[in-house]
Amino acid sequence: MLNQRKIFLHDRIGFVEYLGHLGDDLTVVNSARVSFGKTSEKLTEKDKRLIKYLYEHKHWTPFSHVLFQFRIKMPFFVARQWFRHQIGLSRNEISRRYVKEEPDFFVPDYFRVNADNIKQGSLDEKNVKNDYFVAKLIEQYKASLELYNEMLQNNIPAEQARVVLPMGAYTEFIESASLAAYMRIYTLRVSKDAQKETSQYIKAIFEFIGEYCPVSFGLIK
Amino acid sequence: MLNQRKIFLHDRIGFVEYLGHLGDDLTVVNSARVSFGKTSEKLTEKDKRLIKYLYEHKHWTPFSHVLFQFRIKMPFFVARQWFRHQIGLSRNEISRRYVKEEPDFFVPDYFRVNADNIKQGSLDEKNVKNDYFVAKLIEQYKASLELYNEMLQNNIPAEQARVVLPMGAYTEFIESASLAAYMRIYTLRVSKDAQKETSQYIKAIFEFIGEYCPVSFGLIK
Amino acid sequence: MLNQRKIFLHDRIGFVEYLGHLGDDLTVVNSARVSFGKTSEKLTEKDKRLIKYLYEHKHWTPFSHVLFQFRIKMPFFVARQWFRHQIGLSRNEISRRYVKEEPDFFVPDYFRVNADNIKQGSLDEKNVKNDYFVAKLIEQYKASLELYNEMLQNNIPAEQARVVLPMGAYTEFIESASLAAYMRIYTLRVSKDAQKETSQYIKAIFEFIGEYCPVSFGLIK
Amino acid sequence: MLNQRKIFLHDRIGFVEYLGHLGDDLTVVNSARVSFGKTSEKLTEKDKRLIKYLYEHKHWTPFSHVLFQFRIKMPFFVARQWFRHQIGLSRNEISRRYVKEEPDFFVPDYFRVNADNIKQGSLDEKNVKNDYFVAKLIEQYKASLELYNEMLQNNIPAEQARVVLPMGAYTEFIESASLAAYMRIYTLRVSKDAQKETSQYIKAIFEFIGEYCPVSFGLIK
């Protein structure tokens, strides 16, 4: 059981905050059983096997009746991937056109190195470089923000000034989505060649889902 | 406040049963306010005016974060209209291929008369005719059901035998949908030229919505 | 190459009529290649392997840029299954509220027998029963239509009179959909336990798709 | 009639390129008429009035059978608004993870000034500032690109290096969408408070639509 209702990610600026949910594993079972005109009151072993069967045979609709709501803060470059997922999701996002607060910026813990380019002994080299590039990135972020602020002070509208903001700037939104939708995102965004920064968000979401839908959660792990 | 959790319709066979919901009027407000980076704890008069503004300017996304779940029993000819509405709705339906119970049939309280064909003094005539046609309809339903049962007894699969079932036969399904989705259905299905049998279903749904979202409910009336 | 532009089905009343299309196998390739900033002018062997790769790895979006348009006539009980498929499809359907012509009715070539109930020597029995049930079905259709017509003549509106029409009555609609959407329908509706009457429609659609997208067509067979 | 098949926008780097279409004004008419079981061969004055009626009464489905395909190059900050529109649109986008070419950057012709902050005589002031900010923006773009390139040369993967790229960087994608979808975008993105950079894209798209659907085009102007 999670005590906290907010999971912070990577640089502890990004987060997934649980706002509410509707339904659980039993909802999946009863939505599937409606085809047969049946209802369960309590989750049985047979029901658990049904959930497994539905998942393995890609019968997604019963999973679309369990609904979750989150407040999410993620960098733009992650949001661009995230927002491609559309079916069964609703979103309302913060707008740079209306918000006066300065944006936050994403700083990676460390920069990865392309697997096929790693040479023997490059590990230390990488670590040295990491400090160098993190410093350069922060410097670049600062320069962007300074120009952005200077534009605003000169009455250039935020909608136009934002061209200078980097893809590493944070955005924030409320998202309501079905378990089925999150299962699809999980499948696509936690594969070997998926971007790690994106994987962390869907994994955080499933931490919350796991509390209410342990059987469904057990399947995707 | 409704005491019953199930609203029966027309012939008291069809129904809308409330199963659960997520969010309320405040959810609409906070989903809209995320654009401005703000949150309300309690619904103020200003919040109510915001809901009105959003509704009148057709900003639907804030209404898409309030979610309802119902079990609905309706005749096929209504379901065909209902299932055209797809955005923001999930459904799992009973299947004639798996269910052994005999279907129920819809009998109208009275048959309407085309407005442009009503002649002076035809009202009594109509009532006489109504008894006649209701009797004929029931007779026809019975004949359909008898042939359907005879087919099943002769091992014809239900998927094929159902060709003989009338559009007045009932179906049943679980539906999860957003307030935004139901507002769209309401707008289209409670107009002057909408079919009465369909209007009754969306009105019953809004009886439940009205309990949790009185401000939003007040707008669509 | 098909000479006819209309494929008639089962009882030769139902049909799939080709109305137009946009794109072909090369469109799939170029839509996928946009990720890499590349374009092909002519389909190469390498392109064909790419289509196979996309299909096998369920990368559906490149297939969503090839679009087809059909006029389809199918019985209600098939349409109810067909209309569950929603993503990437647009439909406009004939309305019993506005159309004066009498509906057509679907008569199966033969009634199937539940596999697990077939007894030795029942084959002849089945054929005798088939004639019997086809005759009974047609009789029942006629009785429905007579009552329907009698209602209309007495100024009962068509929207209400249709409760008496059977699920075997035909409907007609125009459908525009992507290759991706039809591939999904094919996968679900041409499996061992799918209903034959529905399978025939998606197979007919792929007869037309095969003309313009032979490589994609080759994959689903 | 357009001679060119590509419309360049603002800084002449962004563009909308026509790739193909399916259907025209007559398709709208025939899709609507299917409800009545009727078909037109040639667009009559009555048909034109029907299109107007459908548009004014928001009967969108007949407009969803006319389909267009474009290759579009737009800056990220415009793409973020554009990609919110999801219904009836398919997209495949270039990926910074796979493409080696350096990105292009959007430079506005001039920066706007918030209407409510314009003081008397500020016009000249604005023009001076404009040159200043355009120069600063280009400088900032260059610094971003240099750091981005340096990261790539040090084997940091593109998926991570892109955090430094500005929202003014260009992306490119293929989009297939219905006339109904573009009408919705037009309505929302060509209003008084819509962002000009986004309006220009939907206007360019309607230049092409106007060639094939002059009647529908006439309605949205």
Image (cartoon, coloured by chain):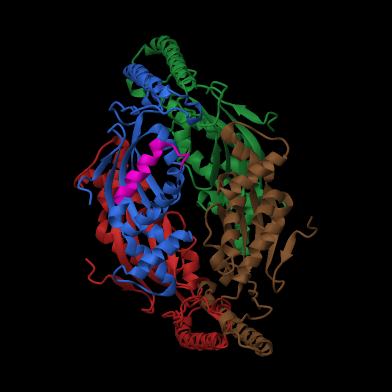
Chain colours: A green, B brown, C red, D blue
**Picture layout, residue D85 above or below residue B2:** above
The reply, left or right, for residue B178 in relation to residue A191 is: right
For the stretch drawn in magenta, what is the main secondary structure? Answer: helix
- Against C209, is D78 above or below? above
Q: Do we see residue C221 in this rendering?
A: no
Q: Nearer the viewer, residue B191 or C220?
A: B191
Q: Count the numbered circles shown.
A: 0
Judging depth in this view, the residue of C164 and A37 nearest the camera is: C164
Could you say which is closer to the camera, residue B19 or residue C123? B19
| D205 magenta-colored | yes
Which residue shows up at 40% across the image and 20% down it? Answer: D125
Span highlighted in magenta in the image = D192-208
Image position, residue A90 (x, y; %): 55, 44
Q: Which residue is situated farthest in the front direction here?
A: D120
Give the side of residue B164 with respect to residue D145, left or right.
right
Front residue of this view, candidates D100 and A113: D100
Q: Is residue C133 magenta?
A: no
> Residue D75's spot in the image, x, y percent?
37, 33
Q: Residue at x 48, y 33 (%)?
A: A79
In the shown orientation, is residue A209 left or right of residue C2? Answer: right
Locate residue A153, reporting x and y percent.
49, 20
Q: Is residue C44 above or below residue D74?
A: below
> Which quadrant of the view contains residue C221?
bottom left
Residue D84 in picture, x, y percent from top left: 46, 42
The answer to whether residue C147 is seen in the rendering is yes
